[in-house]
Amino acid sequence: MVSTERIIVIGNWELGLAVINALVPPDFHTDNLKCAVSVLTYPQQSLSLPPHVSPYAVEHKTSDFTPKSLRDAFAGYDIAICTMAGGDFEFQVRIVDALLAAGVRKFIPHEFGHNTLNPGIRARIPKYAGRAKVLEHLQNNISKASPDFDWIGIATGYTLDQSLISGDMGFDLQWHSATLHGTGDEPFAVSSLERVGNVIRSVCQHWGEIKRHYIYAAGVVTSANEVIAAAEDATGKEWTVDNNDVQDSVREGVTRIERGYPDAGMALLERSILYDEKLNASAPFKSSNTNELLNFPPESVDTIVETAYHDYQRHGKPGCGCSS
């Protein structure tokens, strides 16, 4: 990443904060920043930043996300990173079209989760089906029509700390209990939220070396039983564990969505991916891992869980790495 690189981050929620934290590290100085960072939000949103980042170090831009407004907002940037509405095909196409019109040449679409290229995951979770349509559009339409426009999708696995703190994983940090949907030995890929931000930064730095449109960069492949062991160490308590069938998670997820609780239903469907061995969801994170290229050692499950518990006690939400 050269000193003149201008990066715009689309969205300003937890993931966006992790990206800002990675791009503008704690020891930054305006004279030695390796990139100029901007954040794009809706007009009614105020800018949130990690504690160490001065508002003078990040430009806040707003848009009503109409085509012309987006085109104007993107003018002059080298890389765009989308951290919102990844499963909304029409929204993402609007983003891509505006980037092309504005002359932006590098794009990281909103992935940062399970493997979108896995047909079983796409069939189970609607937002992954939407993300797949975006990737297909980029590959089959944009890359052919505009070969100078480059993009990289990044699968980072399940965001472990975020899902532990929210309870979406079925782990209760307050009452030291966990609901599993299998034996607990099924392998799955995870990352911390901080690691996701660091991976995005490293992709920007190593863009020319990656030479592919979709990469796997999870922090570690682990299992629920390993997470439970780490949770017992972090809390100093023995945990109560309830084992259920993975299809129970799928059925309950679908039922909650049908009853008008989409967030709770989606959390259960996402959780089911961890335990469903028929999906073989962790395989590409083992066979096609790009962490060595990106200069990352494996993450420690113990560290992720301990940090999550610390953040849960202090804030009730995952940290972006801001205090580490």
Image (tube, helix red, strand yellow):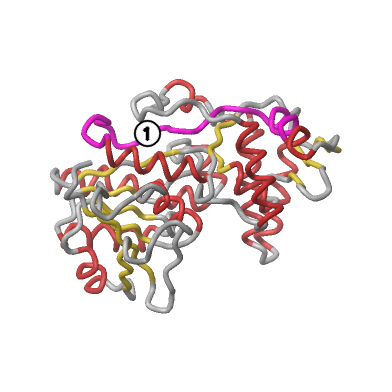
Q: Which residue is mark 1?
A: 215
Q: Is residue 179 visible?
A: yes
Q: Is residue 293 above or below residue 6?
A: above
The part of the image, by quadrant, that contains residue 208 is top left
Label 1 secondary element: strand
**Residue 82: image x %, image y %?**
36, 55
Taking the spot 80% from the left edge, 50% from the top edge, the residue there is: 174
User: Is 302 part of what is drawn in magenta?
Assistant: no
What range is drawn magenta here? 206-230
Q: Residue at x 29, y 42 (%)?
A: 204
Q: Going 41% across and 24% down the picture, which residue do you hit?
A: 288
Answer with left or right where residue 78 lies relative to residue 156.
left
Query: Which image quarter holds the N terminus?
Result: top left
Q: Residue furthest top?
A: 287
Whether 124 is drawn above or below 186: the answer is: below
At label 1, which amino acid type do we have?
A: Ile
Q: Of 43 and 114, which appears nearest the observer? A: 43
